[in-house]
Amino acid sequence: MTDAFHDDFGPAPDEFLDIRPDDTSADELRRSLLLAGYEPGLPGHVGLTAAAIDRQCVRALLCPACGSKGLHYEPYGRRDAYRVVAACPCGFGEEL
Ligand SMILES: [Zn+2]
């Protein structure tokens, strides 16, 4: 008996490119940081030199979802904590 979704040819090519949006969505990362009490912007305890290095690193990254080079650096701060979202215009995001 033939199953239309699981034949002998394996999964469709699109399934190999599928990225789970919950794990790689910049919007989802921003939302979770805000819910955790972080605010957008560089927190006062992080020096400008450190921030510049982080920005350079993020700009050197390749987006694994669309292949674009140069993700956007988005710093978030909460008291003495600092997080960075590396975001792509395609919607991909990664927390560093
Ligand atoms: Zn992208």
Image: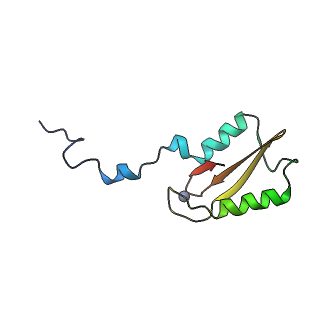
Residue at 36% across / 48% down in the picture?
15
| Image quarter of the N terminus | top left
Specify the quarter for ligand 1. Answer: bottom right
Residue at 29% across / 50% down in the picture?
12
Q: How many marks?
A: 0
Residue 44 on image: x %, y %: 88, 48
Q: Residue furthest top?
A: 36
Residue 53 on image: x %, y %: 75, 61
- Residue 2 appears in which quarter of the rendering? top left
- Residue 51 appears in which quarter of the rendering? bottom right
Question: Which residue occupies the foreground of this view, 18 or 62?
Answer: 62
In the image, taking residue 49 as reference, residue 92 lies left or right, namely left
Colour setting: rainbow
Residue at 20% across / 41% down in the picture?
4
Question: Which residue occupies the foreground of this view, 8 or 88?
Answer: 8
In the image, taking residue 61 as reference, residue 33 lies left or right, namely right
Q: Is residue 11 above or below residue 35?
A: below
Q: Residue furthest left?
A: 1
Residue 34 on image: x %, y %: 72, 38
Residue 78 on image: x %, y %: 80, 39
Question: Which residue occupies the foreground of this view, 13 or 46?
Answer: 46
Q: Is residue 38 above or below residue 44?
A: above
Q: Residue furthest right?
A: 44
